[in-house]
Structure formats: C-alpha cells, structure tokens
C-alpha cells in the first residue's frame, strides 16, 4: 500500500491479521530510511523528513509493508515578539511543523499584521511613530513604505489578484475601511458604515473568488460581520451584532468565513457558510482563541490564548478539535498567522 503524509505529522500504524487489528505491543515496526520517522511503542509514527519512507511491521512470522510519500508542510506568515518576549515584534515565515523559521522584517519598532502580496509581504510598521503600511520581498530585503494612503493605516488585506489593498484608517474620528491600488494610489474610504459615521470598522479580508470583502463593523452595536461588494459599494450584514464577532477570513474557495465569536460565552473559532448562513463552532469548550487564517488545502491556523503564552495551532474544519501545535520560540507570543 502507498499513502501520503506531511513532515511533522503523526499517524497510527495498524497491523491487520485476518482483518483484525493486532495489539501494538505484539508488533515490531521499522522505518526505512530509519531517520525518516520515529515510531513509538504504541505504533505512532512521526514523520521527520520529506521523501518516501517504507514502514514494515512484523508479528511473529507475518509481515506487512506500507510506503508513505512525505511532503513539506505549508509555509505561513506570523509576527513574533523577538528575544523571547523582551524585544519588538517582527514578521516571520515558518513551516507548519515549526521548522524553517525566518525573520523578514527588521528595526527597533514593531512590525506586524502581515499579508502576502505576489512575492512581497505587506505589513504594519510603527517605525514612523504611528501605524503605517510597508512592503518587503518575501525573501527579505528593502522595507518600503506604501505612499499616498492615509496615516495612520493598518490591518492590510490584499486581493486575490494582488492588485488591490484593503486597510483600516481613521475617517471622521473613527476607524474605517479603505481600499487602494497595491501601490497606494487611488485610496478611497470604501464604506460610510451604512450612514453610521461613528461606527468602527476593522479586520478586512478579501474573498479569493471575487471583489468582495468581509469586514467587522460596530454599526449594529457589538462588533459584527458585514460583506462589502466593492464595485457596487453595497454592504450586507452577515451577523446581527447580538454577540461580538471579529477576525473574519475567507476560505480558499470563497464560500466560508472563519471568525472569532463570543456567542457561546467564551472566545471560540466558528465558520459561517455564506450561502446558507449556517454557523458552526470548531473550538472545544471552553476556548480562548484568536487570529484565524486559512491554508490553501482548507485547514485553519489560529492562535490559542488559553495558556499563559500564546500558541500557534492548526485544525481541519471537518474534524473540529483543539488543533495541532505548531512549535514556535518560547516567549514569542505568535500572532496573525496567514496562509501561504
């Protein structure tokens, strides 16, 4: 048999005899090459490298083999606090198994809230004494401020085709949603908060399938979710403001929004099927989570804040649970994971 897995993942190896699973203590497992995986006494294999690995199990005079092709995990953007929590925040890339952690911003001021942008990263920097949007190549290099957009500005999201920015900047004393070309030109206030000039907007996220944005708005009381058709300038409520709903992000297929909500009394991860309005909870109870982001394969990365230090995790929405830990440096308090 042949299977597929991801470096850093763990699977249970099961030996069948006559269609019945043999007790793990009775089976001796080996991997070839031996360095490609570790195998516990309970038969749990953890993949340590990419490439092909052959598992062979032996129970008495019977044996069976399984070949697994192991791929590299996706890479995500995060921001971390440098020096184990003693320094400023910077933007990093990291593989989903915690390897290949690479810093791509620099300086003595906080750099955070990163977004992918066609080989570049758009991020918020405080080096000018206030929040401003900068870009840097994904491989690192010169960090350049985006001109022509209002100051201060933060919380950038980049459209699927890489041509348009959405971001948050003050308007009439309240934070509002703006859009501009990726180079900062043609910046406009994208909403009037449906006539509520004192409402606050936050956390814009572009759909991957059209020119639609989801954004947080306080126009209905609590923070709630609204959908903006940018070309038409029309805004549609997605949640009613009876609970606090924040941090929305579109799924890769443009059909679902992941978000954080207090609707169950704690701070949990939910999904909203946009076509039907069906909301599903993904976090076990109780929960304290933040900052969801989708991977292209449909998994969701997020930050768990239930412990004294923030933890980065991922989960499969088809199997809601507390998620799989993504190792990051102690004290770094990872935030804002976004897809590769």
Image (cartoon, rainbow, N blue to C red):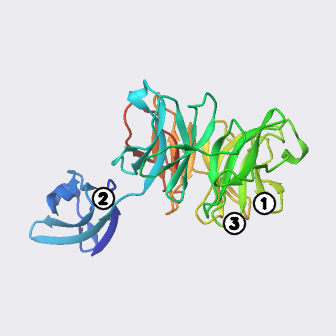
State the image quarter where residue 82 is shown.
top left
Which residue lies under the disc numbered 3? Answer: 210
Q: Earlier in the sequence, mark 2 or mark 3?
A: 2
Few, some or many residues within 10 Å of mark 3 (<14, 14–19, 20+)? few
Is residue 259 something that shows in the picture?
A: no
Task: Give percent across and percent down for residue 339.
Answer: 51, 54
Which residue lies under the disc numbered 2? Answer: 12
Above or below 202: residue 128 = above
* Left or right: 85 in relation to 239: left
Between 162 and 38, the residue placed more toward the observer is 162
Q: Earlier in the sequence, mark 1 or mark 3?
A: 3
Q: Nearer the viewer, mark 2 or mark 3?
A: 3
Task: Give percent across and percent down for residue 295.
Answer: 51, 58
Between 217 and 239, the residue placed more toward the observer is 217
**Residue farthest to the top, as pictured:** 86
Whether tag 2 and tag 3 are in contact, CB under 8 A, the answer is no
Distance between the alpha carbons at the discs numbered 2 and 3:
41 Å
Residue at x 23% of width, y 59% of height: 23
Q: In which quadrant of the rendered image does the N terminus lie?
A: bottom left
Distance between the alpha carbons at the discs numbered 2 and 1:
46 Å
Between 288 and 253, the residue placed more toward the observer is 253
Q: Assign a secondary structure to mark 2.
A: strand
Residue at x 69% of width, y 66% of height: 210
Above or below 140: residue 130 = above
Distance between the alpha carbons at the discs numbered 1 and 3:
9 Å
Few, some or many residues within 10 Å of mark 1 (<14, 14–19, 20+)? some
Whether tag 2 and tag 1 are in contact, CB under 8 A, the answer is no
- On residue 229, which mark appears? 1
* Left or right: 10 in relation to 211: left
């Amino acid at each position: 048999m042949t299977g597929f897995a991801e470096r850093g993942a763990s699977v249970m190896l099961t030996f069948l005899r006559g269609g019945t699973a043999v007790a793990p203590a009775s089976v001796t497992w080996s991997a070839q090459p031996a360095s490609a995986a570790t195998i516990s006494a309970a038969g749990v294999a953890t993949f340590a490298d990419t490439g092909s690995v052959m598992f062979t199990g032996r129970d008495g005079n019977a044996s069976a083999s399984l070949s697994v092709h192991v791929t590299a995990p996706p890479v995500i953007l995060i921001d971390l606090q440098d020096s184990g929590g003693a320094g400023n925040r910077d933007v990093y890339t990291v593989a989903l198994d915690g390897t290949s952690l690479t810093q791509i911003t620099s300086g003595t001021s906080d750099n955070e809230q990163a977004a992918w942008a066609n080989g570049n990263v758009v991020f918020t920097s405080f080096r000018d004494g206030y929040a401003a949007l900068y870009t840097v190549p994904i491989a690192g290099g010169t960090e350049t401020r985006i001109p022509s957009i209002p100051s201060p500005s933060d919380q950038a999201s980049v459209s699927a085709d890489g041509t348009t920015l959405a971001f948050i900047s003050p308007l009439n004393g309240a934070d509002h949603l703006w859009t501009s070309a990726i180079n900062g030109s043609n910046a406009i206030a994208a909403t009037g908060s449906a006539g509520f000039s004192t409402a606050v907007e936050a956390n814009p996220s572009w759909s991957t399938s059209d020119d639609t944005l989801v954004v947080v708005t306080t126009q209905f009381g609590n923070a709630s979710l609204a959908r903006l058709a940018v070309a038409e300038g029309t805004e549609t409520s997605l949640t009613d403001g009876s609970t606090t709903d924040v941090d929305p992000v579109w799924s890769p297929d443009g059909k679902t929004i992941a978000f954080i909500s207090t609707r169950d009394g704690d701070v949990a991860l939910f999904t909203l099927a946009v076509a039907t309005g069906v909301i599903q909870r993904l976090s076990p109870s109780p929960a304290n989570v933040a900052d969801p982001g989708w991977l292209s394969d449909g998994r969701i990365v997020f930050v768990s804040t239930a412990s004294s230090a923030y933890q980065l995790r991922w989960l499969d929405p088809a199997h809601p649970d507390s998620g799989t830990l993504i190792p990051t440096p102690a004290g770094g308090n990872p935030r804002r994971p976004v897809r590769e």
